[in-house]
Amino acid sequence: MTFASLSLSAPLLRAVEAQGYACPTPIQVAAIPAILQGRDVWASAKTGSGKTAAFVLPMLQILGEGRRGVGQRVRALIVVPTRELAMQIGEVVRRFSRAMPAPLKTCVVVGGVSKNPQRMDLRGGADLVIATPGRLLDLAADNALRLDDLELLVLDEADQLLSLGFSDELARLLAMLPRRQNLLFSATFPEDVCALASRILDAPVRIEADPAETLRSGVITQRVIEVDTAKRTRLLRHLLEVHGWSQALVFVSSRHAAEHVADKVKRAGIEAAALHGDLSQGARTKALADFKSKQTRLLIATDVAARGIDVPQLPAVINYDLPRSSVDYVHRVGRTGRAGESGTAISFVTADSAAHFRLIEKRHHLSLERERLPGFEPSEVSAESASPSPLDAVENAPLAPLDVVENAPPAPLDVAGGVKGRRKSKKDKLREAAARAAAVKS
Ligand code: ADP
Ligand code: MG
């Protein structure tokens, strides 16, 4: 199969060649013709399989052939859950659209940076806007852009956008849109979002891969190391030394942990940076850019970096803290082993998180060997009954909102709060407070 056989225009074929793509990936083979035919598409395909080009290429072709924008109108919209992913897709669009005869106007609209340049940029409309939901709604409310003529909507990481954390923003956005072509892409579509997905789509072409395919494909070697909580940073340094990885992406569960671990490894002389939602957008962008350009060896990140972020040739992902949900596990692990390369994902399992990891495995029908490394043998005793896995509570509920989304609405109380057998998190308490405040107002 070649790109030429997918009915892409000559300039786009040249751009694909310039990217060094020899042949299309399976998701590209399946999705590109369907999108060019104007069909709605609902696509699940594993992490790192080229989903971005699968929707960007046909979109650019459709936009290049159609009537250009007038007034403030936006012709196509790509919505994503994080600012970093919006900017990354903006970069992909720039690379592919460079060779097009009549340049398309593309605007990236994200929070955390000042609104005015984006407002100016949107003057006279845009062929394509790539956005996070909060800022998009904000600018729409200011009449800085018009969505009532939209021809094409893409939700990338769609399951997350369809989850509870975004439900209010997504509903407000959909209410502004006319009938249009819809494209939903993700590596995972947990059952609870599927009903909503089908409501958005009109007779879609369903392209379906097993969500855990990434995990069982063998492309990514998954390892589990048992270790005491207090020895994890030393273990991390040990692994870097033993394996000599050029880089590793380390996931932690809080903004505080990201800073703390980054500080500790930096003091040990390793180039590292933290990436989380408490940083200024400038610092976030720099941390990721330095990591992508291989200037830092370690990026210590919260789940803000779990979805969609593409760091080519990333050899290793470390779950320093385990992800809350098994869906997040797929996305974190999928930051390595991209575009047909191989990679290693290592999860640190402590006495406290052992039960939780077993549930993640169960959800994905995995059974991974527990390793103990000399010098790091755990001595902590499992207190499993005292710390039930958060997975039971999270898993059947929609995904927790990322900590990055600007103005994310608090989730309704009935799902997040009051889940049996689970201690209330800070987020739960905030949600409850917000719900109480809302109840007082209404
Ligand atoms: P996904 O969204 O499926 O996780 P991406 O779209 O981010 O994956 O692509 C992952 C990597 O694969 C990117 O670095 C991208 O440039 C590369 N890639 C995409 N399509 C091809 C292709 N046809 N041939 C080679 N590399 C590709
Ligand atoms: Mg992607």
Image (cartoon, rainbow, N blue to C red):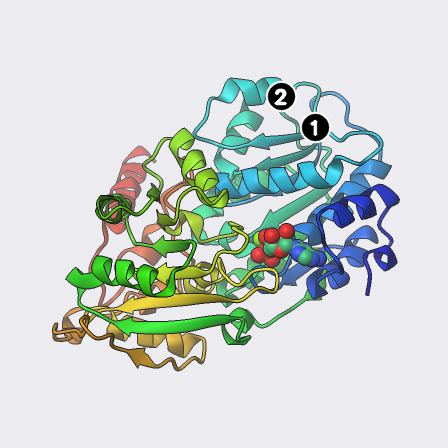
Sequence-first disc among 1 and 2: 2
Q: Position of residue 229 (x, y in %)?
A: 18, 63
In this orientation, which residue lies closer to the viewer: 288 or 408? 288
- Position of the C terminus, as image quadrant, is top left
In this orientation, which residue lies closer to the viewer: 253 or 438? 253
Residue 224 lies, with reference to residue 244, above or below; the image says: below
Give the residue number, with chain letter if any, for mark 1.
126
Residue at left 51%, top 50%?
A: 311
Residue 107 lies, with reference to residue 375, above or below; the image says: above
Residue at left 33%, top 73%?
A: 224
Any part of residue 184 in sight: no
Q: Position of residue 314 (x, y in %)?
A: 48, 56
Residue at left 54%, top 71%?
A: 219
Q: Total label count?
A: 2
- Snapshot quadrant of residue 420: bottom left
* Label 2 residue SS: helix
Any part of residue 138 in sight: yes
Check contact, mark 1 vs mark 2: CB within 8 A. yes
User: Is residue 74 found left or right of 367 in the rendered image?
Assistant: right
Q: Position of residue 204 (x, y in %)?
A: 72, 60
